[in-house]
Image (spheres, rainbow, N blue to C red):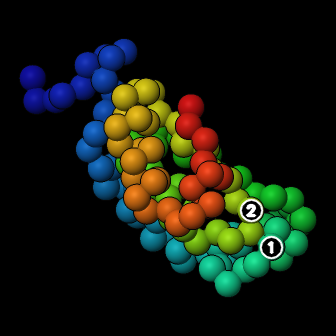
Amino acid sequence: KDTDLIPDVYEGGLKVWECSLDLVAHLHQQRRELGLEVERASAADVNVKGAPGKIPACLELGCGHGFPGIYVLQRARAGWSVCFSDFNDDVLRSVTWPNVLMNVPGDQRFRATYV
């Protein structure tokens, strides 16, 4: 058996999913279109396609380390919120939450929820 996965118990999350870094790079490339420019000052400045004037939110499913959601919280100055979700509560408590606390500045970290 060449895996640490245990069905219905541990489905991953303690290891970094390589594609999460690719997703961060994609978010960075699309930052203007997504309203993730650091210099944006308020929710009124955000113009997400199909939802002008709406406060944008991000749901990261199977978040593990939470790199894409952390990127959004680091960059978003316009009221974005991020919901981090993972099958394992232990991953959320021991990996995701500490990563958010260490890498997201000030009040931005309070725009995160965990389920």
Residue 68 position in % (x across, y down)? 49, 58
Q: Does residue 23 appear anywhere in the picture?
A: no
* Three-letter code for the amino acid on which mark 2 is drawn: Gly
Q: Residue at 53% across / 66% down in the picture?
A: 105
Q: Residue at 62% across / 51% down in the picture?
A: 110
**Quadrant occupied by the C terminus:** top right
**Quadrant occupied by the N terminus:** top left
Residue at the extreme top of the image, as rendered: 8
Give left or right: position of 111 versus 89: right
Decide: is 79 above or below 61: below
Residue 72 position in % (x across, y down)? 57, 63
Q: Which residue is mark 2?
A: 79
* Three-letter code for the amino acid on which mark 1 is drawn: Ser
Residue at the extreme left of the image, as rendered: 1
Please rate how many residues cluster around mark 2, counting C-alpha atoms within 10 Å: few if below 14, some from 14 to 19, many from 20. Answer: some
Residue 90 - label: none
Please rate how many residues cluster around mark 1, counting C-alpha atoms within 10 Å: few if below 14, some from 14 to 19, many from 20. Answer: few
Give left or right: position of 57 versus 23: right
Q: Does residue 49 appear anywhere in the picture?
A: yes
Q: Residue at 35% across / 43% down in the picture?
A: 95
Q: Residue at 31% across / 55% down in the picture?
A: 18
Earlier in the chain: of badge 1 and badge 2, it is 1
Residue 42 - label: 1
Q: Are marks 1 and 2 in contact (CB under 8 Å)?
A: yes
Decide: is 21 above or below 60: below
Q: Secondary structure at mark 1?
A: loop
* Quadrant housing residue 107: bottom right
Q: Secondary structure at mark 2?
A: loop
Residue 81 position in % (x across, y down)? 68, 53
Residue nearest the viewer, comparing 105 with 52? 105
